[in-house]
């Protein structure tokens, strides 16, 4: 197996691994990916913040993470965004300066495409980006100016994600994966429905609440409020202990128990979800998923085997009645076979080989 010399860009916003109080899926995944790449013997250099504690070869710009600095020195609002962009680009410029010296065979920028994209033409080393966001009109505008022919390469996290920008220079689809040691399988079905994620319109938190009420089921919600007005209008009035409960933000150590204790995860999304990590987290614990048929859902959930894919509230309510048809062991097996960190890194290795063979 060929070993690669890889420059891996994490972020300068947070340390690696993330602080315990932060859940930010792309950066959680970045930590797992670089750890697995190094475990496999690749020569990986991580570009990250000065306060990162990950035990591997890393390069910083001599700056503590923006997260640790912002409360002390940053202004907030629009200027906060400008300063955060500068923070990322200072670190990115260091990586591309190093790449000009021939240190790497490939650059893998794991997120933050618009902030890093302008640098890709400064070196002969090919750059590949992992896309974590829905591809929409705003992305078309940003990326159109910086395609740089074949210098910018893109990995989608689902095939569906590509629909918004089908003409990008895609070099592969690599599904997200989990460290299964962090998600304990729970064979016995719980007595509540679960919702996990942002309490926002696009995630369908309001639909989850109404489905639970109409089905006369308990619902436990975990996540963070995203837009207080929406939450205050569509969720807060229906809270009732023991029936519709907001358990709030849960750190990584508590996610497995929360998801594994549910009879099903409700995923009534209102947008083109690029992947939906929470779906595989639930299934890893043995908990089936009932999801609206949007975005990546058909690529992640096996209808009738690991949950149900539905079109509306009525069908979601019917699926809840039939949830006993799903074998929880099948949910876990589906993740073991398709959505582990090992499978994920297999996919990245294949992309690296293909890109370098084309040169």
Image (cartoon, helix red, strand yellow):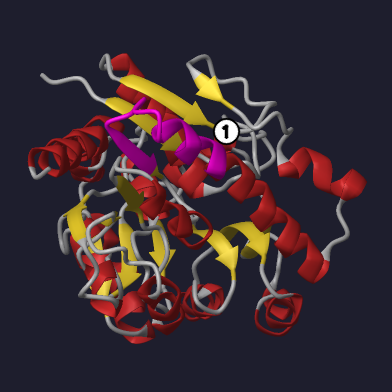
Q: Where does the image place residue 144, in percent across and percent down from the top left?
A: 36, 76
Q: Would residue 19 be found to the left or right of residue 305 on screen?
A: right
| Residue at x 21%, y 75% (from the top left corner) | 166
Magenta-colored stretch includes residue 57? no
Circle 1 packing at 10 Å, graded few (<14), some (14-19), many (20+), is many
Question: Mark 1 highlights which residue?
Answer: 48
In the displayed structure image, the side of residue 44 where residue 165 appears, left or right: left
Rendered view: 127 above or below 141? above
What secondary structure is marked by label 1? loop
Residue lying at 41% horizontally and 31% vertically, measured from the top left: 32
Report the number of discs: 1
Confirm whether residue 250 shows in the render: no
Quarter of the N terminus within the rendering? top left
Residue 124 image position (x, y, % from top left) = 29, 43
Instruction: Give me the residue at 36% from left, 25% from top.
Output: 103
Q: Please name whichever residue, 317 or 59, is drawn nearer the observer in this view of the structure.
A: 59
Q: Which range of residues does the magenta coloring cover?
A: 93-108
Q: Is residue 223 left or right of residue 150?
A: right
| Residue drawn at point x = 28 percent, y = 83 percent | 311
Seen in the picture, residue 52 relative to 132 is either above or below; the reply is above
Seen from the viewer's position, the closer of residues 6 and 320 is 6
- Nearest the viewer among 253 and 43 is 43
Q: Position of residue 117 (x, y in %)?
A: 44, 58
Where residue 33 sits, quadrant-wise, is top left
The residue nearer to you, when weighing 227 against 94, is 94
Q: Quadrant of the C terminus?
A: top left
Q: Is residue 119 above or below residue 296?
A: above
Q: Is residue 96 magenta?
A: yes
> Is residue 303 in view?
yes
């Amino acid at each position: 197996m060929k070993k690669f010399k890889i420059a891996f860009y994490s972020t300068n916003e947070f340390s690696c691994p993330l602080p315990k109080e932060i859940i930010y899926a792309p950066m959680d995944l970045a930590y797992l990916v670089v750890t697995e790449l190094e475990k496999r013997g690749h020569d990986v250099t991580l570009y990250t913040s000065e306060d990162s504690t990950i035990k591997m070869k890393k390069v910083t710009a001599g700056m503590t993470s923006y997260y640790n600095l912002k409360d002390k020195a940053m202004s907030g609002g629009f200027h906060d965004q400008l300063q955060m962009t500068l923070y990322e680009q200072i670190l990115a410029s260091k990586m591309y300066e190093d790449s000009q010296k021939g240190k790497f065979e490939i650059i893998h920028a794991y997120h933050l495409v618009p902030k890093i994209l302008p640098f890709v033409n400064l070196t002969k080393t090919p750059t590949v980006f992992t896309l974590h966001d829905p591809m929409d009109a705003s992305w078309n505008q940003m990326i159109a100016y910086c395609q740089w022919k074949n210098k910018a390469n893109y990995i989608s996290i689902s095939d569906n994600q590509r629909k918004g920008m089908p003409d990008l220079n895609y070099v592969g689809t690599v599904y997200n994966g989990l460290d299964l040691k962090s998600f304990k399988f729970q064979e016995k079905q719980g007595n509540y429905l679960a919702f996990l994620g942002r309490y926002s319109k696009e995630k369908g938190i309001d639909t989850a609440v109404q489905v639970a009420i109409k089905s006369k089921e308990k619902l436990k919600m975990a996540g963070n409020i995203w837009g207080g007005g929406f939450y205050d209008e569509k969720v807060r009035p229906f809270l009732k202990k023991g029936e519709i409960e907001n358990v709030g933000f849960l750190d990584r150590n508590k996610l497995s128990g929360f998801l594994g204790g549910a009879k099903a995860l409700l995923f009534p999304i209102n947008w083109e979800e690029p992947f939906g990590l929470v779906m595989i987290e639930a299934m890893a614990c043995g908990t089936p998923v009932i999801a609206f048929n949007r975005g990546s859902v058909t690529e992640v959930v096996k209808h009738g085997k690991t949950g149900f894919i539905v079109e509306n509230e009525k069908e979601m309510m019917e699926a809840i009645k039939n949830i006993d048809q799903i074998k929880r062991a099948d949910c876990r097996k589906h993740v073991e076979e398709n959505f582990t960190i090992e499978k994920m890194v297999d996919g990245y290795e294949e992309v690296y080989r293909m890109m370098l063979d084309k040169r």
